[in-house]
Amino acid sequence: MKRSMKHVWRAALVTGAFAFPNAAGAADLLPPPPSPAESGQHPGLPPVKGEVQVTGGVFGVDKGFSDRAFVSLQGSLYDDTGLGFHADVTRSMREEKANFAAFGASYAVTPKARFKVMVGTSSKNNEIQPELYLNGSLTYDFGPQAGIVVIPEIIYRSYRSGVDEVQGLLGINKYFPAFQDGSYVVGSLNGSVNLVKPGDHIGWEAGANITHVRPYYMSYGIGGVVGSSAYDNTLGLASISVRNDYFGVRPSVSVFLSKDVEVFARGEVLWTDFYTLAGGYAGVKYTF
């Protein structure tokens, strides 16, 4: 019998390393868009009118903990006024099974800055997907000479179990000058801080990734992550704060079947104080 204890569920609330991508989380880990020279636009802003992405993944967990799987459908549409519309539907399968859906909009207030908001909810479950999901983010591009895109983000999740989580995230992408063959390298730094109530500890995560991109052909990269999940475990009538430190590696690859169709995959091995997680996800992305 796989474990389904409350503290196992709450470990998933604190960091994306333990949960499944939703609200475009999977897309955030994909290879970067074409270079400014290829797209004719800054790398931080959408170079296309729309995109649809299908993703599926499986993660095995040892020490008797439940394995995890998910499938998701994500899409975005952009118009000439700067408006964008976004949707994310995910099916999660682990200690419980649940459906999650989030919808939102974005607006390019300047050629360099786009604000985005998402609102979501899930089918009935205790703690693997939130009853209420709110996400606000800003993508700011410092321009082709700097080659830097910064993405601050804040997420609120409220679960039917009575747990509330506030997560602050910051991503920094650096696009390095292209080589003679037109390929280029992108370096990424990201971090997050999680406040979970009830609970006395603060969860956090820090990661880095480097990706070599050959526009409209293929890309490959490797990333690393360290962090600590923080949550509370109910034992009898007492609530005990728990920490679970971890580190891991995340290789990734993508191949363009055509200029509009990209297939991608990302693996993950995560070593924690309580268990080891290994698996990954793959999918296909169509831009138009």
Image: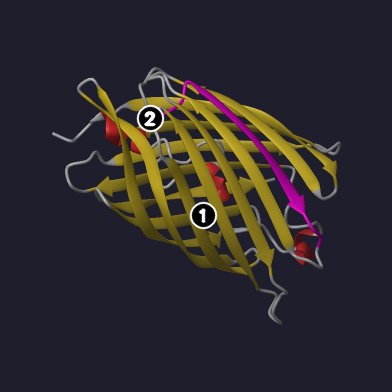
Residue 32 in sight in this render: yes
Image depth: mark 2 or mark 1 in front? 2
Residue 264 as seen in the image, left or right of residue 44: left
Instruction: From this view, report whether residue 124 is shown above or below residue 201.
Output: above
* Quadrant showing the C terminus: top right
- Report which quarter residue 187 is drawn in: bottom right
Secondary structure mostly seen in the magenta stretch: strand
Instruction: From this view, report whether residue 152 is shown above or below residue 160.
Output: below
Residue 14 as seen in the image, left or right of residue 245: right
- Residue type at mark 2 is Ile
Front residue of 285/166: it is 166
Q: Tell me the residue at 28%/36% (across/down).
A: 8
Q: Give the range drawn in magenta.
A: 129-143
Instruction: From this view, report whether residue 45 is shown above or below residue 130.
Output: below
The residue indicated by pointer 1 is: 263
| Residue 253 image offset from top left, x and y in percent | 49, 62
| Residue 92 image offset from top left, x and y in percent | 38, 33
Q: Tell me the residue at 38%/30% (across/down).
A: 128
Q: Looking at the image, what colour scheme do you see? A: secondary structure
- Report which quarter residue 202 is drawn in: top left
| Residue 146 image offset from top left, x and y in percent | 78, 66
Distance from disc 2 to disc 1, alpha carbons, whole Å, reads: 28 Å
Residue 38 as seen in the image, left or right of residue 189: right
- SS class, disc 2: loop
- Residue type at mark 1 is Val
Q: Earlier in the sequence, mark 2 or mark 1?
A: 2
The residue indicated by pointer 2 is: 128
Residue 135 as seen in the image, left or right of residue 92: right
